[in-house]
Amino acid sequence: MGKALIIIVLLVAIIIFLVLSNVTKKMIEVPDTISVKLAESQARAIGNYAINYGLKQVMNGNVSVASGSSFSQGYTNFYILEDGRIDSLRYSADGDTISISAFVFYEVNGHQVYHDCEIDITTTTKIDITSAISSSGTISVSGSAEVNGEVVENGCPAFEDIFGATKDALKNNANNYYVDPANNVEPIENVTWVECVTQTGFHITDNNYVGNGILVVNGDFSMTGGTFNGIIWVVGNLIISGNPTINGAIFVESDIEIEGDAEVTLTGNCEVNFTEGAVGDAILTLPTALAFNILKWRN
């Protein structure tokens, strides 16, 4: 009887030990599982950040990829959050499609997770800009006015073909939006939309004025002084007189009149130069959502 009791007690003790061991193991496994899931979640978040960083590099012109080529940028101390980092970004291009791959790393409680993600994008602009002035009507150049570049009459391209977006989309995403502004309003940089409602047009008259980026005037536009670098799009009539300088490209959905001498000025020396660099810089100011179409995004 005594031996049987001892055996029973031992068996119960063994069972309790096994149960407690299993519970302890489960208690250890639960935090481990949580740690792994957290690491995976954080790694995906870092991957998303890395892809957006790569997009900005392309948008800002810091990274350019020729069609048919690829290259990688490696990082050693590009930390995101406390225990995660970007290992490398890979850029490749095939025609108008640019692919960006991100390789990232995150560690929590000794658990290391490596993650990779990628995006394929294509530019939304459909045609190359090659002319100094394009108009849907006639173009008159007189006096000492100087145009360096191709002049295209009766051939203004579609707005969407130049900017890859509708007028409403660009207006809603403009960095600067003015309604019936005063002369020489500032700033005009990045993407600027001028809406003429009660007044017929917008005027730049200051010889020291400097603007850049993309300027869209929904109304008439006259420029008699200053400098502009980028793309000007006018939905109305354009008059350039006096001594302004425009570097980039001009598009007008109406007639253009360029006069070497304004009626009351002695400085008839206006100049329009097609400048590929200024055009390219202007396109880069487009918001990412408008500048590129996302073909694929895997995270």
Image (tube, rainbow, N blue to C red):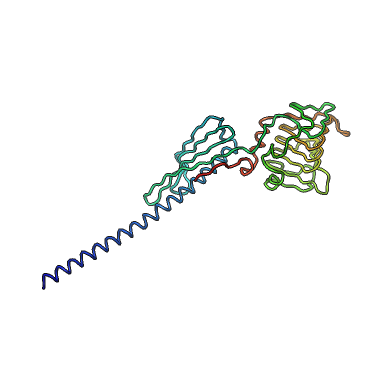
Find the residue positioned furthest to the bottom.
1
- Is 263 left, or right, of 225 in this rendering? right
Q: Is residue 146 above or below residue 16?
A: above
Quadrant assignment, res 140: top right
Q: Is residue 94 above or below residue 4?
A: above
Quadrant assignment, res 210: top right
- Is 25 left, or right, of 4 in this rendering? right
In which quadrant will I find the N terminus? bottom left
Q: Looking at the picture, how far across and down is residue 178, in whole percent? A: 75, 47
Q: Looking at the picture, how far across and down is residue 217, in whole percent? A: 76, 42
- Count the marks: 0
Please report the residue visible at 44 percent of the width from the left and 46 percent of the height from the top. 84
Q: Is residue 26 above or below residue 73?
A: below
Q: Looking at the picture, how far across and down is residue 88, in whole percent? A: 47, 38
Identify which residue, 227 or 26, lies in the foreground.
26
Please report the residue visible at 41 percent of the width from the left and 46 percent of the height from the top. 113
Find the residue positioned furthest to the right.
263
Identify which residue, 280 or 254, lies in the foreground.
254
Please report the residue visible at 27 percent of the width from the left and 63 percent of the height from the top. 20
Q: Looking at the picture, how far across and down is residue 101, in whole percent? A: 50, 39
Quadrant assignment, res 155: top right
Please report the residue visible at 38 percent of the width from the left and 49 percent of the height from the top. 111
